[in-house]
Image (spheres, helix red, strand yellow):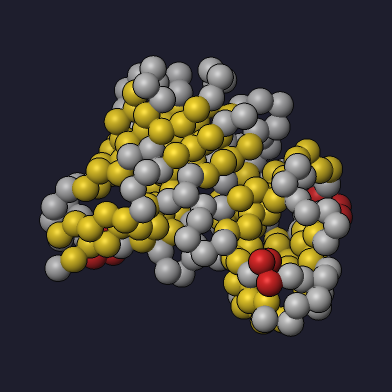
Amino acid sequence: AQTVTQSQPEMSVQEAETVTLSCTYDTSENNYYLFWYKQPPSRQMILVIRQEAYKQQNATENRFSVNFQKAAKSFSLKISDSQLGDTAMYFCAFFVTDSWGKLQFGAGTQVVVTP
Amino acid sequence: EAGVAQSPRYKIIEKRQSVAFWCNPISGHATLYWYQQILGQGPKLLIQFQNNGVVDDSQLPKDRFSAERLKGVDSTLKIQPAKLEDSAVYLCASSPFAGPEAFFGQGTRLTVV
């Protein structure tokens, strides 16, 4: 069974500063994907960034980047130049590419960006 | 491209009543997920369809929850009878065959009183 752990219930950051969210996972699989999703108060789950486990290069999407450490089973998200619109719940998610695939989520980290 | 559509957005019912949620996935997406998200927690997978077949319902409380996906397109999730602990947001998501990226609807917030 796979597990996804997010140990930071809430993080606060000032506008324009950088914040890093942590995520660890446990799996015996070799082929999988990792994601960070953002969920604002509207409840719409929005994909922020994805990482394929077979790729060594860390994924980057504009102000969002990840630090993927496969051996340590760690997948952190860095938000640079934080903006007020970044305030949301952030979920780390794990997708294992077995016969049908399953998307599994961590408990989430609430990010609050303050002026 | 139209996104995942869910209805209703909100529902309040009394315990022991029944309720149904509807989801229309993105056109052509073979995989459909229903998740339950209790306040302050991450989404928990209830059931996963591949076309009109169930591939995972291991966490679905089958004594009260049921789901179907007729014709492999839209889906309905039903709770009968509802309990107080069913209060949650119910999220529907879809993805192309075998994923990995899932696209989510806006969810239905259920309150059981």
Q: Is residue A99 above or below residue B30?
A: above
Residue at image point 32% right, 56% down: A10
Residue at image point 57% right, 46% down: B102
Foreground pick, B12 / B96: B12
Where is the C terminus of chain B found, in terms of image quarters? bottom right
Percent across and percent down for residue A90 are 39, 52
Residue A77, quarter of the rendered image: top left
Residue at image point 61% right, 50% down: B44
Percent across and percent down for residue B41 are 50, 56
Percent across and percent down for residue B39 are 52, 64
Residue B10, quarter of the rendered image: bottom right
Mark yes or no: residue B76 visible: no
Foreground pick, B77 / B16: B16
Q: Is residue A16 above or below residue B51?
A: below
Percent across and percent down for residue B109 are 60, 72
Residue A66, quarter of the rendered image: top left
